[in-house]
Amino acid sequence: MVTYVSCLRAYGCALLCLLAAFLLASCTDDARKGEIGFPSTGGQQGDSLTGPASAAVGNGMKQQAIARMQQAIVQYERVEGLGGWPAIPYGETIEPGDSSARIILLRELLTKTGDLTGTATQESGRIYTPTLVQAVMQFQARHGLEADGRIGSTTLAAMNTPVEQRLEQLRINLNRLQELPDSMGQRFVLVNIPEYKLRAYENDAAVQEMAVIVGETYEDQQTPRFSDEMEYIIFRPYWNVPERIAAEEIVPEARLDPTYLSANNYEITSDWGPDAEVMEVTPENLDLVEAGTLKIRQKPGEENALGLVKFMFPNPYDVYLHGTPADYLFGEQTRAFSHGCIRVEKPVELAQFLLLDQPDWSRERIEQAMHGGEQTRVDLSRPTPIHIVYLTAFVDNEGKVHFFEDVYNLQGDGQPRTGDQRMPEDPNAMDPGR
């Protein structure tokens, strides 16, 4: 992941900065090599992060994060009192080196947002200079956008968000911060939904970081927000196809093509238990699947919708973490594709972290279990807390304010505007990318 060096050095203290990586995409290859601002703790050589997120999570860190957010609110209220920042008219994408009358407004906006500082704020002219490009790239990074310096409609939409709306966003996330546990645990996993990011922490330092895919924006497929404990891992899992997906998507295909189930490693079973009887594919049994009497599951393997491993923390929402065969989706900027569960980019590394206290589970053994023949369950000797949170704004230790898209369009109380009814589900349809 690419990073802004200038945004990284103060990232060692705040609970809030657990969520920091989403906004720091780097502008240069050199920035990729910038130091993180905190030590790697508890990981093997090569496990230290190359992204900006870090945090101390002991008692008091939450209050420091809250204090920074409160200070940011005061600063934004000051900008509001001065009339806010100007709106920049939409038009053709502004490329580095372009000349445009909009550059005058751009310079004023970047000065008020704090992305343009020093003598650069006193410059004039209509040329989109390298100095302005760097300021725009910082603005883009702070708002979770691709930091390419090009000013198109997406960047303009973020720039034209009025200060009043940003203030509301800060206040909402201040409330969400206040609701977080005072201590997250000595070792824990944290997922920030709007950031599409997971981090694993050991002794107040992030030792793993990876992209995730979260639930779609539909009300019944959103990833819920809660804390729990990771209890066990299943290598080479079966995918127990939810009844609705089986009836509405798989059965019609199987009726059209008698080889469809076997070609996609599906089988009809009496139930979802470990000793379930495998049934023949007949029109009568397909009718029973449609009626919910019989089940369909997908056998373990490379093309299984859950990938080669799932991470279990039993909960009322029936969600969990798992791999995916659709790795290409991690390259997307917005990654709300699942039916509620969370797909992880680096399942091997996450398994290593969770099995750190079980040294007989080396990386080699983990990979063997993932690519072996049988399903294997491994109970964790030490259950690991997992926190699934929803923060769309935070302030880093340098006082830089970062915003992220409100992907679920939540109200200030953290609830969907029309309720949070969830379907009983396994997270993936047959097409994990939809």
Image (cartoon, rainbow, N blue to C red):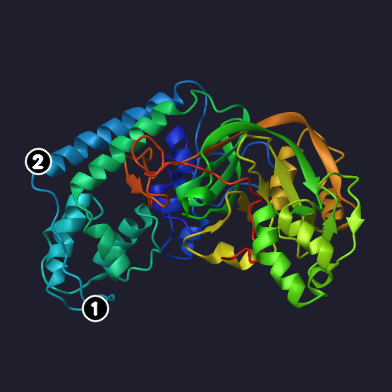
Q: Distance between the residues labelled 2 and 1?
A: 31 Å
Callout 2 touching callout 1 (CB < 8 Å)? no
Location of mark 2 (residue): 81
Q: Foreground residue, 33 or 53? A: 53
Up-down relation of residue 422 to residue 218 (above or below): above
Q: Which of marks 2 and 1 is nearer the N terminus?
A: 2
Left or right of 67 in this view: 206: right
Please name whichever residue, 3 or 100, is drawn nearer the observer in this view of the structure: 100
Q: In this view, does 111 lie to the left or right of 192?
A: left
Q: Please name the residue shown 59% across and 52% down the image.
A: 210
- According to the picture, the residue beneath numbered tag 1 turns out to be 92
Q: Is residue 382 positioned above or below 402 on the image?
A: above
Q: Quadrant of the C terminus?
A: bottom right
Q: What amino acid type is highlighted by mark number 2?
A: Gly
Q: Which residue lies most toward the top here?
A: 59
Q: Residue at position x 80%, y 53% from top?
A: 294
At 65% from the left and 63% from the top, the residue drawn is: 248
**Picture coordinates of residue 365, whole percent (x, y):** 86, 49
Amino acid type at image mark 1 = Glu
Residue 21, position in %: x, y?
47, 49
**Of residues 215 and 64, the one drawn nearer to the viewer in this rendering:** 215
x then y, percent, for residue 377:
84, 42
Q: Is residue 14 visible?
A: no
| Closer-to-camera residue (406/299) | 299
Q: Residue 36 carries which label?
A: none
Q: Please state if 275 lies on the left or on the right of 187 as rendered.
A: right
Place residue 290 in its image quadrant.
bottom right
Name of the residue lying farthest toward the left: 82
